[in-house]
Image (cartoon, rainbow, N blue to C red):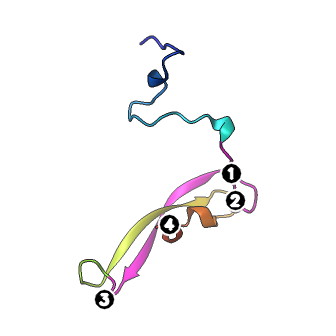
Amino acid sequence: MIIDPTNPNQNKTQTGTPQVDLSKTTELACECENDMFMPVMKFRKTSAITSPTGKAGIIPFECYVCTACGSVPDELDIPKIL
Ligand SMILES: [Zn+2]
């Protein structure tokens, strides 16, 4: 494939997500200043009253923990994103 730098439509990944100019983004780092994270699973328990299915259960969430200190930054804590 030939990349035409004047055609912005070619500046996309196969999923159609536009590529972001990383120089215009801000880095998300942990309180410990580490900026690498790994995915982990968290689980929320629901009661029958709050569950959309009407049954008590456990809902899994993926979130990201700091690879250095293991904490989850507020911005990556799933219940706050929802
Ligand atoms: Zn950390």
> Is residue 7 inside the magenta stretch?
no
Q: Is mark 2 within 8 Å of ligand 1?
A: yes
The Cα atoms of the two marked residues, 2 and 1, are separated by 6 Å
Question: What secondary structure is found at the residue carrying circle 4?
Answer: helix
Q: What is the spatial separation of the Cα atoms under label 4 and label 2, in whole angstroms?
A: 15 Å
Which mark is on residue 49? 3
> Which quadrant holds residue 68?
bottom right
Element on which disc 3 rests: loop
Q: Which residue carries the number 4 mark?
A: 78
Q: Nearer the viewer, mark 2 or mark 3?
A: 3
Judge by depth and name the residue closer to the eye, 67 or 17.
Answer: 17
Percent across and percent down for residue 55 are 25, 84
Residue at 75% over, 56% down: 33
Q: Is any part of residue 72 visible from this angle?
A: no
Q: Is residue 28 left or right of residue 59?
A: right
Residue 32 vs residue 2, the one in the foreground: 2
Q: CA distance from mark 1 to mark 4?
A: 18 Å
Decide which of tag 3 and tag 1 comes sooner along the chain: 1
User: Residue 52, how many percent across, how many down?
Assistant: 28, 77
The type of residue carrying mark 2 is Cys
**Left or right: 69 as drawn, with respect to 7:** right
Question: Earlier along the polypeptide chain: callout 2 or callout 3?
Answer: 2
Say which residue appears at 50% left-offset and 65% top-offset. 81
Q: Is residue 33 magenta?
A: yes
Residue 82: give x, y in percent of width and height: 46, 67
Q: Residues within 10 Å of mark 2 (few under 14, many from 20)?
A: many
Which residue, given by chain and number where applicable, does mark 2 sit on?
A: 30
Question: Residue beneath label 1, please?
Answer: 35
The part of the chain drawn in magenta is: 25-50
Q: Which mark is residue 51?
A: none
Q: Is mark 4 within 8 Å of ligand 1?
A: no
